[in-house]
Image: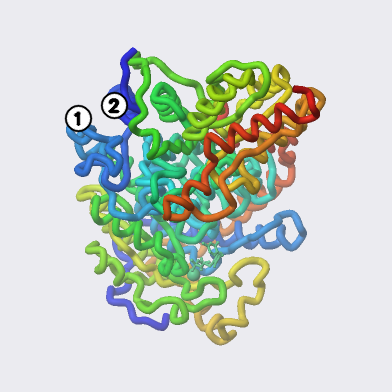
Amino acid sequence: MAKTMTQKAAPGLGLDADLARKLLRDMILIRRFEEKAAEAYALGKIGGFLHLSIGEEAVAAGATSALRPDDYAISTYREHGHCLVKGSDPRRVMAELFGRIDGLSKGKGGSMHLFDKEHNFLGGHAIVGAHLPLAAGVGFAIKYRGGDQVIVCYFGDGAVPEGEFHEALNLASLWKLPVVWICENNRYAMGTSLERALAQTEIYKFGQTYGIPCEPVDGMDVLVVRDAVARAVDRARHDKTPTLLEARTYRFRGHSMRDPAGAVYRTKEEVEREKLRDPILLFRDRALKAGVLSEDDAKKIEKDVNDLVDEAVAFAEASPEPEPSELFTDIFKEPA
Amino acid sequence: MAVMTYREALNLALREEMRRDPDVFVIGEEVGLYEGAYKVTQGLLKEFGPKRIVDTPIAESGFTGVGIGAAMVGLRPVVEMMTFNFALLALDQIVNSAAKLNYMSGGQYNVPIVIRGPGGPAHQLAAQHSQSMEVYFYHVPGLKVVRPSTPMDAKGLLKSAIRDDNPVIFIESETLYNVKGEVSEDPDFLVPLGQAAVRREGTDVTVIAYMGMMYRAMEAAEELAKDGISVEIVDPRTLQPLDTETIIRSVRKTHRAVVVEAGAGFAGMGSEIATEITEEAFDDLDAPVARVTGAQAPMPYARSLERLKTPTKEKIADAIRQVCYANGSR
Ligand SMILES: Cc1ncc(C[n+]2csc(CCOP(=O)(O)OP(=O)(O)O)c2C)c(N)n1
Ligand SMILES: [Mg+2]
């Protein structure tokens, strides 16, 4: 990371085996799932835009581990990971990518529009910045009903120069809404680096502007993410105070499958250097060294995840395409 | 029944629905303390308090998005646009979020939201405050669009819109807020979305018109009656879904049609309705469908120019005469 982080690295203490297993499993699930999706894309089984979050898994896994199942999450088009670790069935997520009827959205949403009501996953939104006001609205509804859930809203650094980022942060702060804003700062919006987009590149500082707690977070360290999000969730749950977290991370792949090299706007050296901080390897090593996980545990996780993802692909492949009549269903709410 | 203004009818609809359903709330600029830029929400803050009558800063995209997000998880927001011209700042939220979420989620997240406020020509408000905004919305699958012309419809349609499980764009008119009429005080009275009303029965020609244009068409019809021309007036009330059945039934009876709209005519509601009539009832027509539309120009400020921009009673009457005397049948 180019910028130094203010907080200390997480100690890795107080981490029990179950949690370690879960965090590692969630991160590997995202990685393997997306590797398989990339293969399927190359074979023409997935179309359109496919954005991978490989390299950024620690943010989704760490943040989600600090949530209750009835908390909400909402995200961008780079949301496979957020959706999977929120609890969605990988088979149905893959079927959605394949455009099949058993997909979460019956194949009508695709990779960029994953929704899973059962797990309070509010989507996959592909207009940069547009889902931030929606997150504030969900926070508004939680408060309106006197609930104690929170909503986590993931967005990219590319949303920060958009007006809706500022409108949403202002409203959430003004009205004290239980929103945890998580900017996944991977330093690029397509090919535009932070420096070319923002007059203030320390994104977390916008939290100061809107009078809310804010901090930069090492987005490659799943425990640091978990810790920061847990504190933010606590504030949101108990004081209805929103927080802006800037998770500094990096995408190892291109912007989408149509930018495979991802290298015209950044150097190979930079990409290689960042890959040294692979969040999965970092955490795996730490957990092994600390003795909370054994090699065998790690291998078993790998194997289980591989099986799960293979099964997801087989399921997606076997699922039928939507019937022609589906074109016209769900335009409006279908009568019960 | 009671006689009240269009404004009071809207206010009553909001009150009744808010009393009936605690999930209904109003959000927008100046809706609370100021009691509404056009006083539609007068007294609501007093009755329902700031939790349910929510004043916002000037952030149309932001607070419309808040409404959509709240609707996704089950609340029933009524978002007020101070005027619909400002809805352009929220157009992305309306078109890309509200209209699409149910579809993109395969039916998991519907959006029961009403976005309401005045739109269309007013009095010397010039180019940025007088636009007929419905065209921006009825093109979009997933949105319903309502234009209520009378106090009774204002109440009954707003209540239906609030109870609808989908996004409804509800465009009122500054020029109609003071119009008085009979309004049902029955809290269960509804006007269903998607049903046109025959405002005046006639046998020679069908005029399709809504909002201020409907009233001008009525005046033209009165005048033409003296010349022995019997005009039927159909008010679509809901533009999406459009009740083409009622329109076509009327045209089959009269064999002639004139469509009136306040906005510029190019690819407007008139084009759509004229096409529907041509496709469905071509053989019934004794004359080509005529359109009377706003001029293809921004709304000017000067009173003299403003008069030229929007269809007048005279223009409507001329078009009706022309259609009636076409092919020498009269
Ligand atoms: C409003 C809008 N403008 C432009 C785009 C095209 N676009 C898609 S992704 C993207 C970059 C966004 O970058 P960032 O927010 O940093 O997220 P990341 O892709 O890095 O995860 C752009 C410009 C869009 N989808 N929406
Ligand atoms: Mg980015």
- Give the mark nearer the N terminus: 2 vs 1: 2
Marks 2/1 in contact by CB < 8 Å: the verdict is: yes
Q: Which amino acid, by three-letter code, is at mark 1?
A: Glu
Residue at position x 39%, y 51% in the image: B125
The part of the image, by quadrant, that contains residue B198 is top right
Q: Which amino acid, by three-letter code, is at mark 2?
A: Arg
The part of the image, by quadrant, that contains residue B250 is top right
| Label 2: element kind | helix
Residue at position x 31%, y 37% in the image: B26
| Label 1: element kind | helix
Which quadrant of the figure contains the C terminus of chain B?
top right
Residue closer to the observer: A324 or B251: B251
The part of the image, by quadrant, that contains residue A9 is bottom left
Q: Reply above or below: A281 against B80.
A: below
Residue for badge 2? B15
Residue B54 x, y percent position in the rendering: 26, 42
Disc 1: CA contacts within 10 A as few (<14), some (14-19) or many (>=20): few
Residue at position x 27%, y 37% in the image: B39
Residue B213 x, y percent position in the rendering: 51, 34
Residue closer to the observer: A185 or A336: A336
Q: Is residue B233 visible?
A: yes
- What chain does badge 2 belong to? B
Residue at position x 20%, y 50% in the image: A239
